[in-house]
Amino acid sequence: MKYGHLLLILLSNLLLSCDDDDYPYAEVPSVVLNEFWAEYPKATDAEFSQFQETYEVEFEIGDNDYKALFDSSGSILKKKREISWSSLPPAVRNSLRKQYGEKDIKDPEVLRTGDKTFYQAEVRRFFSNEKVVLNEAGKTDTTLIYWK
């Protein structure tokens, strides 16, 4: 009788562990997953989050952090990636250096939305960090909100 109870408990645990939580992308539409993997085949550590009708994915390629926002049909709405200070265009680098000083800039990123390219970075301040978005010419863009 004891073996029967033990077998029943083991089978119950086995069946309970077979839910769809074991597949991390169970809630993401296949069209979004297909477009993501087609665009970023070398991505690792992909984590999807749903916001209304969009899907945000954070992932890595090599040592760089990336983020992309897809609509429910799989189209990329915007994407960003971490870049080095030296990878910033000269106009953006000069603008940041002039306004804030190079040593106060951290985490520069290139942001693409549609066919436009922007650059964003955090500026270290004494009490709180300031987040800035610049266009390709190095001008601060107040129409675009910093994307965390």
Image (cartoon, rainbow, N blue to C red):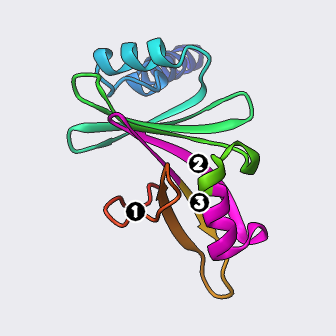
Indicate the position of residue 21 as horizontal and vertical percent values. 43, 28
Q: How far apart are the two marked residues, 1 and 3, measured between alpha carbons?
A: 12 Å
| Tally of marks | 3
Question: Label 1 amino acid?
Answer: Asp
Q: Which residue is mark 1?
A: 141
Give the residue type that dot 3 points to: Ala
Residue 42 horizontal/vertical position (percent): 62, 17
Which amino acid does the dot numbered 2 rest on?
Answer: Glu
> Of callouts 2 and 1, which one flags the residue occurring earlier in the amino acid sequence?
2
Q: Is residue 31 above or below residue 79?
A: above
**Horizontal and vertical percent position of residue 126:** 69, 87
Local SS, label 3: strand
Q: Nearer the viewer, residue 132 or 136?
A: 136
Callout 1 secondary element: loop
Highlighted range, magenta: 93-119
Q: Which residue is mark 3?
A: 121
Within the magenta stretch, is there residue 104? Answer: yes
- Label 2 to label 3: alpha-carbon separation: 6 Å
Mark 2 highlights which residue?
Answer: 109
In the image, is residue 37 above or below residue 87?
above
Asked if residue 8 lies in the magenta stretch, the reply is: no
Q: Is residue 144 left or right of residue 120?
A: left
Residue in view at x 53 percent, y 19 percent: 40
Check if mark 2's residue and mark 3's residue have beta carbons within 8 Å: yes
Residue nearer the viewer, 7 or 144: 144
Q: Residue at x 40, y 22 (%)?
A: 19
Task: Assign a secondary structure to mark 2.
Answer: strand
Between tags 1 and 3, which lies in front? 1
